[in-house]
Amino acid sequence: MTPESLPYLAAAVCVVAFLYSSVGHAGASGYIAVMTLFHMAPAEIKPAALVLNILVASITTWRFHRAGHFSWPLFWPFALLAIPMAFVGGYLDLPTRGFKLLVGVVLWFSAIHFLIRPRDETEVRSVPRSAALPIGGGLGLLAGLTGTGGGIFLTPMLLMMRWARAKQAAAVSALFILLNSCAGLLGNLGATRRFPVLALVLVGAAIAGGAAGAHFGSSRFNPVVIKRLLAVVLMIAGTKLLSGA
C-alpha cells in the first residue's frame, strides 16, 4: 500500500465503521475486506483489524447498553470460554495461504448473513448452557485466528435459534466482540511483539464512523439496505482472498 492511498483507506474505514456499528457490529470483517483491497499484508491486517474492532465495539456496546438492549444472562455463557480461546487464536500465526482461505470463507459467510432476512420476532427461547459454552469457545478461537470478534457468527445464531431479538442480539454481540478482540490482540502482541502502527493512523476514522453509526443504529435505522451494501463489499474482498490463496 502506498502513502498516497492512506487517505482513501481511512475514508473506507470510516464508512465501514459507520455501517457496521449501525447494525450492532464492530466491523472487523469490513476492515479486513478494505485492507485486503488496499493490498495490506496479512501480518498487518489481523492486529490492525482487532485494534479498530476494540474501539468501535466499545462505542457500540455503550450505545446499545444505554438503549436498554443488553442481557447479561444471555451474554455470559457464550463469553466464558470465548475470551481465553480468542487469546489462543490471536497467539497462533496461520500461514499466509491458510489465513487467506480462512478469512475468505469468513467474509463470504458474513456476506450471506447480511443477505438473509431474520425471522419474525415472536417468541424467544432460553439458551441451553450446554450449547452456549462450546459454541462460545469455538467462536472465540475463530475470532482470534482471523482478527475478527466472532459477532458476525454469534448474531445470526442467536436470531436463527430464537435465543434473542434483533436489538438484544446486537447488544450481546457488541460486548462479545469487544472482549474477544481485546483477548485476540493481547495474544497476537504476545506472539509477534509488534504493534500495528498503521492502526493508530486509522483510529480517528474508526471512532468517527463508529460513533455516528451506533447512535443511529441503536435507535433509528432500518438496517436492511445497509446490510445489502455490506454484503457486496464482503463478497468482493472474500473472492479476492480466495482467488489469491
Image (cartoon, helix red, strand yellow):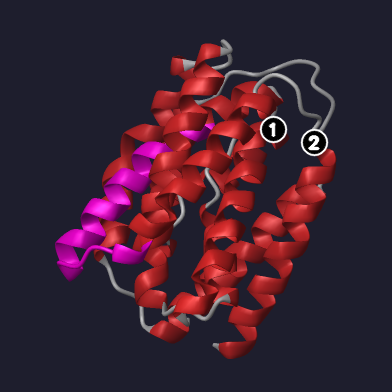
Quick check: can you spot residue 130? no
Q: Which residues are magenta?
A: 173-198
Asked if the magenta segment contains residue 188, the reply would be yes
Say what amino acid the circle numbered 2 marks.
Answer: Pro
Spatial distance from mark 2 to mark 1, Cα to Cα? 7 Å
> What residue would you read off at disc 1?
159
Marks 2 and 1 close (CB-CB < 8 Å): yes
Give percent across and percent down for residue 216.
Answer: 68, 27
**Numbered disc total:** 2
For the stretch drawn in magenta, what is the main secondary structure? helix
Say what amino acid the circle numbered 1 marks.
Answer: Leu
Residue 86 located left or right of residue 153? left
- Disc 1 crowd rating (10 Å Cα; few below 14, some 14-19, many 20+) is many
> What residue would you read off at disc 2?
118
Give percent across and percent down for residue 82.
Answer: 36, 42
Give percent across and percent down for residue 211.
Answer: 54, 33
Is 244 or 84 nearer to us in this picture? 244
Query: Residue drawn at (66%, 56%), measured in percent from left and top?
Result: 110
Is 91 or 43 nearer to us in this picture? 43
